[in-house]
């Protein structure tokens, strides 16, 4: 199992593939899922991304935190299960 990252402050129009390609500039991404409303299927403005290991997660956090994607600065932190 990889390391999960929470990606917040997404533009509601950003698509999974766009986010994945953007983050892959900084580190390896094994999975990317923009979270959507279960009734409207519209983006909730955040995503869960998985990396293969700690070093890849650190590279993405260090490189992509605050970078503008589709007009909004990304907020990135480790994913916390509740």
Image (cartoon, rainbow, N blue to C red):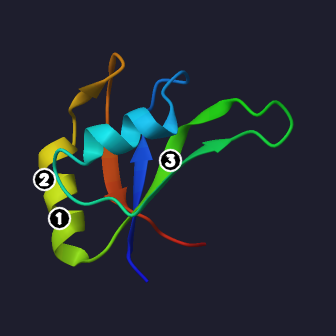
Q: Is residue 30 above or below residue 32?
A: below
> x and y percent of residue 19 in the render?
39, 38
The one nearer the camera, 74 or 29, is: 29
Residue neighbourhood size for the residue with mark 2, other residues' Cα within 10 Å, grouped as few (<14), some (14–19), many (≥20): few
Q: Is residue 27 left or right of residue 44?
A: left
Gap in angstroms between the C-alphas marked 2 and 3: 17 Å
Q: Which mark is residue 58?
A: 1
| Tag 2 near tag 1, CB within 8 Å | yes
> x and y percent of residue 28 in the render?
25, 60
Q: Which mark is residue 47?
A: 3
Residue that appears at 75% across and 39% down = 37
Q: Is residue 62 above or below residue 79?
A: above
Q: Extreme top residue here?
A: 71
Q: Is residue 35 left or right of residue 63?
A: right
Image quadrant assignment for residue 2: bottom left
Q: Is residue 71 above or below residue 34?
A: above
Residue where numbered disc 2 is placed: 62
Q: Extreme right residue here?
A: 39
Residue that appears at 14% across and 59% down = 59
The one nearer the camera, 43 or 82, is: 43
N-terminal-most mark, 2 or 3: 3
């Amino acid at each position: 199992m990889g390391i999960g990252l929470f990606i917040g402050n997404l533009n509601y129009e950003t698509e999974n593939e766009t986010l994945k390609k953007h983050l892959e500039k900084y580190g390896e991404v094994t999975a990317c899922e923009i979270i959507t409303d279960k009734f409207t299927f519209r983006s909730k403005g955040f995503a869960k991304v998985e990396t293969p290991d700690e070093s890849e997660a650190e590279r993405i956090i260090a490189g992509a935190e605050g970078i503008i994607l589709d007009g909004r600065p990304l907020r990135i932190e480790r994913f916390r299960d509740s």
